[in-house]
Amino acid sequence: MTRYGMLIDTRKCVGCFTCLTACQSQNDLQPEEAFIKFSELENGSYPNASVTCVPHQCMHCADAPCAKVCPTKATFISDDGVVGIDTGRCIGCLYCVAACPYGARVVNEKTGVPEKCRFCTVSAYENGTPMCTCVEACPTSARTFGDLDDPDCDLVKQIAQTGAQPLLGDTTDSSIYYVR
């Protein structure tokens, strides 16, 4: 069984927004629409202060609060762990927007559907292997994508080596891990 996940190493992220631009292009998003958002964390104190850029997006939670509250089951968790949206079933109630602790939903102005990161697994494959556009575009290799259930996967090895953790701990059983 496959369960997709990602590691984001904030020590490598320079805040260049290349992942955001690639994501917008891949998903045909308008300039004001973004599946990837950024936060800045201040570290230390003057004169030894620094700022860490933290990109965040849908965390593809195994226990997704957005899927739990969806009255039509338009938001669902696929067998590969990707939280998806059946746009035909969505009634635009925005319960999923309110339930997401990460603020990951973006309401499509044209359709009224609250969309989000799809891990690009629907459309982006290279040599039969799923890939994410944001991972491929990152100039500092701050992102790694793979199968969380495959012990031989580079993603799993990097999570173990770096001690990466989900952004909010085990609150939502997130599929995205962070090195901070």
Image: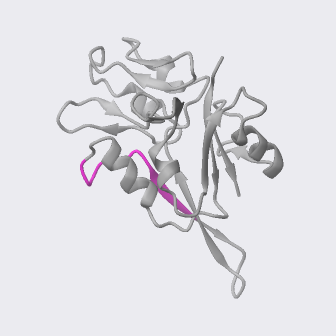
Q: Position of residue 71 (x, y in %)?
A: 39, 13
* Residue nearest the viewer, comparing 18 with 175: 18
Residue at 25 percent across and 37 percent down: it is 108
Horizontal placement of 43 versus 130: left or right?
right
Residue at 49 percent across and 25 percent down: it is 83
Q: In the rendered view of the protein, which quadrant contains the N terminus? A: top right
* Residue nearest the viewer, comparing 164 with 125: 125
Farthest residue, direction left? 110
Q: In the rendered view of the protein, which quadrant contains the C terminus? A: bottom right
Q: Quadrant of residue 26?
A: top left
Q: Position of residue 21 (x, y in %)?
A: 37, 56
Farthest residue, direction bottom? 47
Q: Is residue 68 above or below residue 113?
A: above
Q: Is residue 75 above or below residue 104?
A: above
What secondary structure is the magenta-colored segment mainly?
A: loop
Tell me the magenta residue range.
30-40
* Residue nearest the viewer, comparing 95 with 80: 80
Q: Is residue 119 above or below residue 77?
A: below
Q: Is residue 31 magenta?
A: yes
Q: Position of residue 86 (x, y in %)?
A: 34, 18
Q: Is residue 23 magenta?
A: no
Q: Quadrant of residue 98?
A: top left
Residue at 63 percent across and 22 percent down: it is 2
What is the basis of the colouring in this image? one colour
Q: Quadrant of residue 40?
A: bottom right
Horizontal placement of 159 versus 42: left or right?
right
Q: Position of residue 161 (x, y in %)?
A: 82, 49
Q: Is residue 50 above or below residue 158?
A: below
Horizontal placement of 33 versus 77: left or right?
left
